[in-house]
Amino acid sequence: MYANIIVDISHEQLDRTFQYRVPKAMEEAVAVGSQVAIPFGKGNRTITGYVIELTETAEFDENRMKEILSVEEQAVAVESQMIRLAAWIRRQYGSTMIQALKTVMPVKDKVKQVEKIFYHWNVSREEAEAAVCEAKRKHYKARARFLEALLEEGVLSKEEAAKRFQISLATIRPLLEKKVIREEREISHRGGARAYGADGTGVILNEEQRRIADDICRHYDAGDFQPCLIHGITGSGKTEVYMEIMDHVIAGGKSVIVLIPEIALTYQTVMRFYKRFGNRVSLVNSRLSAGEKYDQFMRAKRGEIDIMIGPRSALFTPFPNLGLIVIDEEHESAYKSEYMPRYHARETAIERMRICGGMVILGSATPSMESYFRAKTGEYRLYRMTKRASSGSQLSSVHVVDLREELKAGNKSIFSRTLSEMIRGRLQKKEQIMLFLNRRGYAGFVSCRQCGKAIGCPHCDVSLTAHRNGMLVCHYCGYQIPMPKTCPSCHSPYIAGFGLGTQKVESMAAAAFPGARILRMDMDTTSKKGSHEDILTRFASGEADILVGTQMIVKGHDFKNVTLVGILAADMSLYAGDYRSSEKTFQLLTQAAGRAGRGQKQGDVVIQTYTPEHYSIEAAKNQDYEGFYEREIMYRRMLGYPPAGFLLQLLLTSQSEEKAENLINQYAALIQRRYNGMIDTIGPTDAPVSKMKDSYRKLLYMKSRKMEWLIQAKDDIESAFQDASPGRSAAIQFDFN
């Protein structure tokens, strides 16, 4: 048996592995992730390495191959844990080991820690004064200048010595060698935590919050690390429960990672953690440079912080003593990676805690179907929070407006009569309004403004998507029809692609409500560093009456003076060509509704839609998660979609259309032959964007009752692809569920 070993876990070195022979006596002890001692280089000096792969194939002459010297059996180094996690990601999601390693050790190439060097006296004051006199006597002007300044100030940085006194290293080196002065190195931290002191006060929990926090802590102390799902309505105080449990875990000497979707990672949210835990908290997000992120990860590794808060990538913070991972708003699609390997933070967090022994807590007002399904089947422990935390704060009244009726009444504006009337009333009372444009998943679906129906695929229960060539296409099976002139259901001519942007909404609101102060929040207005925070702070301080935005305005914000939320086009995500479209719509509408009436004033929510009878909209109106779940899981079971089944998408790209066609057909035939009755295939078909950067893109979907079968199918396709060795002329990517 041979082991491929990395000897230096700095990012530039991850691609370089060295092969060693595994002695017979060590075969059982050596595993992926093992820390081993190996002879290295010409002098065979003993160094530490980490096993990233075991194989029976020698990559070069076995007679020249060195042997592993020993296995560090007690090693629980964080590097070993991360390599084991990378191996799991590679197997579970499909990628190379190098891609997986670069995911779990996310430090950019050639990023060095910023070190500051300070000079201190290493002798008594009398000896220091004598050294100054000696330098002057010998006419060492630069040295005398430096020593006089050091005598006066007690400590000088290398930077100051160079800038203020034009001192070179050649001047200072003799003083260091004679031990007249000493240098101290201090790592400078870029980004992350700010200098906040904890106020030491925790919120007094209500009875419901206390019961849940105590029960989870009891299980944690008993070593029962079953994942927990907290299903709490908007405003029920889930964050206070997380913080209480975090306090308990940290008191036991362990560290905590808190994952929050990027768009909900607001100043408001983060300040709650700083106030409770002070400077033991750090923060990473996509706005940090590679160097800033590296510094924060190194602080975690050295034990200088206890809590790391951030989006998906914070999951790989190298805490050596991790005890808890909290995933807030666990239903968010941002927890799924868009790049290879396409891992999901929820499953990966659970595996990381299985490796190092700790707990995962998931929380949401609208849990993902997967998590709730697992909670219902006993895989997760379920806790429910049914009351709003602040007394006097009530759930909003929800009004659903049928836009078909508005059209009949001659109202062609994007604001229904009900919403317009309510906006004017709020403006008079000096209360605030949020207008939410539901653009997530918008993919150019076609619908009728008279009957409200979207044109769907007869085979896949998803909407057809409009392509520029005038065809409507299903992105699952490839079914297509030409764009009809009239609605197939009611024959109305009011049929078209559905499109509306936030800029358009902003200008229409300005025209409809003159005098109203309007702020817009979308990708365009938040592209600069700090702009996201700036817009929210201005709105919170009452500088605007109306905030117009996409889903980023409905995540976790708490504005006491917002008493009206208008959801302008609920149908936009309802008809994305995706089996999750009803779930995403229900989640977004429920989250948006939760932004109104969070203070003492009663809130109202207006949902504008062409399909008020759709079960996801009815359930959002009634804030009825359970009712939505039961209806949706029934459809998922009928169609074999997750979580009732499992789905694997294979994307094959090639610069030759013929090669792409041949390979994808071979893999479809391979799966049908080997897994007949175990896996259903859908396709092959062209990808939604069938050609990109001169590469042709083909899709094959595979559905199965068991995840293991799909992982095995992935492995078979990977082997067949390697055997075909198409080199750089073709590539494959896998995406589960």
Image (tube, rainbow, N blue to C red):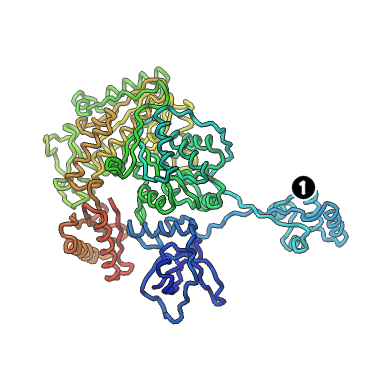
Q: Quadrant of residue 419?
A: top left
Q: Residue furthest front?
A: 222
Placement of 327 over or under 73, stated as above or below: above
Image position of 705 (left or right of 219) = left
Task: Pick the residue in front: 32 or 90.
Answer: 32
Task: Pick the residue in front: 363 or 670.
Answer: 363
Q: Position of residue 55 (x, y in %)?
A: 37, 70
Q: Position of residue 358 (x, y in %)?
A: 43, 48
Q: Position of residue 125 (x, y in %)?
A: 83, 51
Q: Amino acid at mark 1?
A: Glu
Q: Position of residue 547 (x, y in %)?
A: 40, 30
Placement of 611 over or under 149, stated as above or below: above
Task: Pick the residue in front: 102 or 403.
Answer: 102
Placement of 409 over or under 117, stated as above or below: above
Q: Secondary structure at mark 1?
A: helix
At 31% from the left edge and 67% from the top edge, which residue is drawn? Answer: 729
Q: Residue furthest bottom?
A: 63
